[in-house]
Amino acid sequence: MTTAARTAPTGPAALQRRGRFRFGDSLLYGLTLVAGFAAVVLLILITWKVLAGAKLSWQTFHLGFLTETTWNPVTEVFGAGLFIFGTALTSIFALLVAGPIAIAIALFLTELAPPWIRAPVGALVEMLASVPSVVLGLWGILVMGPWVVSTLSPILSTLFGWTPFFDGEQTVGSSQLSAVLILTIMVVPIVSSICRELFTNVPTELKEGALALGATRWEMIRGVVFPYSRAGISAALILGLGRAVGEAIAVTQVIGAGTKISFNLFSTGDTLASKIAASYNSAGTNLERSSLVYLGVLLLIFSLIVNVLAQLIVRRVARRQQGRT
Amino acid sequence: MSVQADPGYSLSSERLRRRKVVNRIMEALATLAALLAVAVLVIVVASVVKKGIGAINVDFFTQTTSTFSFGPSQSGIANAIVGSLVIVFFAILMALPVGILAAIYLNEFASPRMRAPLQLALDVLNGIPAIVVGIFVYVLLVLGSGQSALKASFALAILMLPLVARSTQEVLALVPDALREGSLALGAPRWRTTLSIVLPQAVGGIITGATLATARVAGETAPLLFTSSLVGNEVNWNPSHPLMSMPYFIFAASEQADPGLQEQAWATALVLIAFVLVASTIARYFGLRSRRRRSGKR
């Protein structure tokens, strides 16, 4: 090496090179910065545009839209009441069924199963989440529907016939019950994969401590695993609820587009998302189209709240765990 | 809540037996739940294969769909396959660069204070229902000027973006800092370090993430209803027209009572599910392998 090279490079060539370097850096920085903000821009744009699309309906119905239960294109009276009810009923039932199953699967995969079983079974459960919803819906009407009518609904009717939810029997394949079952299938893999991660992160020394004190495996789970991951489990359930509320296609295929509010799961119904999906090619007037977008606004607001809430919980849990290790 | 160390707890054999029985029941229930989930997957896949395989032949891939309700059942889905390819291709083209660049910003440039809200935005975007994204693109682009495959691609790209960005960010975070420091110490500028040192290290993981995201959106129907559903029966590669797609065909055919169309829907579902499951299984396998290799190195 010569002495000239050891001193700081000077002269126009070096300056130009350094300048180009800086230009390359700021170019990449600028490009990635724009891309990094793409999600923020999209969120704002989605909110703004969907709100703008619902303006006409908002000016006509205001908040009365939420409680109005008719959807009549002829008289041009539109309301979301029926769909809000249907969404709440199906999602809550789906979560009631899916929650315990998903947590049980996560427990099986983290605490019970021998190691060689964990990976394949875990992969299969996650694969359930990647079955396209339209395929699940097709299966829901043509295979599960008839089975629900012939086998499941008589059983539920005899067991729980005394509740308003399972009164009488189901006669056609489409029903709110079918929607609940399909939503359950979609929610289970999501909740179980989050719970699985949570349970893996429970410190081994706590678990071993409980077992060493003579606790059975279930007592260890109840005494250590659940309390340790309580916040995370609630976040997982909230995310599952968000998924159930937002699912449109499969629910449209199996719920039967009912027009009456009914607590009976054997009867048909409709949800916010499924109403939008079912009306994609039938919305005639501007007011009806705007009212469909209004339904979308309700879904959007709900999913924003649910996701921000769940993500904040997830982040708090992660921070707490980082602090401990 | 903690386990109580009651001295009489384990001394009483009656009580001990009850605790063991409860434990056994709970273990059995957990095993049953896992079996149930696997059984549902097997039943769904088996029904699709059983009901769809009969309609799959050469014609199925070369003929086009027939008009609903009075079509002969001997036709195919060539136009739906082409449409799906076009729509998904352009969705990848839009989502992949933006997603990867966003991940580079989050992992290489952003300060922690910047990173947290941007990640939150990606995760929240990921949670927005596909039907709402469809409605958004409908209001933004379709109202007034009509449907097209490109608009459908844009909707799918919105769904892909957070998946690509988050998975890329995860693999970028695994690239050891020593490599970056080594490159910078040799005098390479930041952009050069990022593009020639960091990205090549992560390329396997990026492809895995992109494949999983593609498999996920290839089966999406909701965003297509408002953006690419007024479709004809001819094969068309032009993305400025609304195009038939496999998910939309299944959706439309599943609402018809015609058994011929239903069989076609099953066969299309078989093609779609085969693509989705094979793609995501391969991606997962390679993702797992590269992760194992990397952790083995350390």
Image (cartoon, coloured by chain):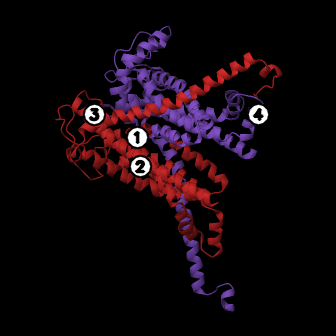
How crowded is the residue under tag 4: few (<14 C-alpha within 10 Å), some, or many (20+)? few
Per the model, the C-alpha gap separating discs 3 and 1 is: 20 Å
Instruction: Identify which amino acid the numbered label 3 is placed on.
Output: Ala
For the residues beneath circles 3 and 4, the answer to whether they share a chain is no
A308 relative to A265, above or below: below
Q: Which chain does the numbered disc 1 sit on?
A: B
A182 relative to A5, above or below: above
Report if residue A256 is visible in the image.
no
Judged left or right of residue B142, residue A98 is right
Per the model, the C-alpha gap separating discs 2 and 4 is: 45 Å
* Disc on the earlier residue, 3 or 1: 1
A274 relative to B215, above or below: above
For residue A30, the mark is none
How crowded is the residue under tag 2: few (<14 C-alpha within 10 Å), some, or many (20+)? some
How crowded is the residue under tag 3: few (<14 C-alpha within 10 Å), some, or many (20+)? many
**x%, y% of residue B241?**
27, 49
Under circle 1, the secondary element is helix
For label 2, the residue is B279
Q: Which chain does the numbered disc 2 sit on?
A: B
Residue at image location 49% in from the left, 49% down from the top = B284
* Disc on the earlier residue, 3 or 2: 3
Per the model, the C-alpha gap separating discs 3 and 2 is: 25 Å
For label 1, the residue is B134
Mark 2 or 1: in front is 2
Say which colour chain A has.
purple
